[in-house]
Amino acid sequence: MTRAGLRICLIASARFPVAEPFAGGLEAHTHLLASELVRRGHQVSLFAGPGSDPALPVTELSVGPFRDSAGGHGPAGSDPDEWMREHHAYLHLMAGLGRDGHHRFDVIHNNSLHHLPVAMAAAVRVPMLTSLHTPALPWLESAIELAPPDSVFVAVSTATRAAWSHVVDARVVTNGVDTVRWALGPGGPAAVWSGRIVPEKAPHEAIDAARAAGLNLRLAGPILDHDYFAREVERRLGPDVSYVGHLDQRTLCAVVGTSRVALVTPDWDEPYGLVAAEAMACGTPVAAYARGGLPEVVGTAGGRLARAGDVLDLARAVTEASDLDRTEVRAAVLGRASVSRMVDDYVAIYDELSARKAAA
């Protein structure tokens, strides 16, 4: 088997399409990974949500209507219809892979957050790699207990590996960014915040910190929690703070590259912090809460860190980061967060797993 001839089943999220404008870092990461694998000559089959980029070799996950019994319901706190649609889509996929996946693929890369690919891996005669893009979640913890012993798990940061260490001994493959697309920008007078507009990303704290630091702020990203947006974000908008919308990557690169500093404000342990790496690739220094993988991504050359949840300390980090040299900020991310390095790391694991399959 040559390195350019692997048959790769890449499982993505069923909830959001792998297409621009991306709903979040996971979709952007999957698109970048699939595109680079195809460019290198691998045979990729991407199983992803409806509406995914038709330029990729996509098979849409069948997230269609599902009629359950009158008493059926999903987990407490979930939308039962949505839960069942996703459950049915992954169940259908894994059952199909169990029937003939060993004839079609050399390796499966599970890049979704769903528990079924992990839990059903033992029923599929193809080695599976699962990327861990979240802190430890109970439904994934439970699924890992059912995974065959030859399954491989990869964490996207050493912090995420530590968060999963009580469940599984994961390897580390940090995320990459397209450092050609995310090119060095000239900077500008305003700050930027980008990402999913949801409570756990806390953009309202970015607004408060930017104001405390005396900088205008542009917010970009999909509004996935409209109640939160109305309650905490919309009322803070004004002449110095604007919401610029859910942007495609070309437009977002321009906004980030013409910003003075990028704020990253997770209210959870950010598994990696892709928006920080993207900003640094543009030369835009980062002011971020020191949570999860962000200290690894930002370091000391890419920006400044603040105590988690401390808006005034974040304002201090904004002021200090704003004075960093943009070429040095970009240089800090070029080697360790390039897409080439990330895909090299994944392909090395694919080769290992496909050789194991051939030997078996």
Image (spheres, rainbow, N blue to C red):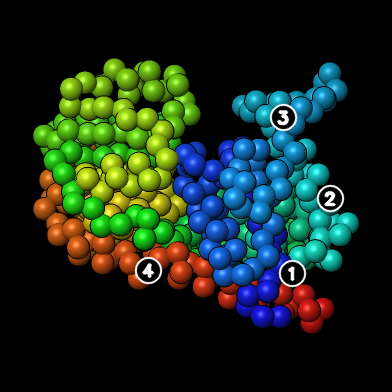
Q: Are marks 2 and 1 in contact (CB under 8 Å)?
A: no
Question: Which residue is the site of mark 2?
Answer: 95
Image location (x, y in percent) of residue 309: 29, 39
For the residues bearing labels 1 and 4, Cβ distance under 8 angstroms: no
Distance from the alpha carbon under mark 1 to that under mark 3 = 34 Å
Q: Is residue 41 above or below residue 46?
A: below
For the residues marked 4 and 2, what is the alpha-carbon distance in whole angstroms? 38 Å
Residue 164 visible at all: no
State the image coordinates of residue 202 (x, y, percent, origin top left): 35, 34
Residue at position x 34%, y 55% in the image: 182
Name the residue at 60% across, 43% down. 52
- Residue at numbered disc 3: 74
Tell me which residue sits at (68%, 74%) in the image. Answer: 5
Q: Of the two numbered discs 2 and 3 on the same chain, state the one appearing first in sequence.
A: 3
Percent position of residue 76, x then y: 66, 28
The numbered mark at residue 336 is 4
Mark 2 vs mark 3, CA separation in Å = 20 Å
Dot 4 falls on a residue whose secondary structure is loop
Image quadrant holding the C terminus, namely bottom right
Tell me the residue that label 1 is attached to.
106
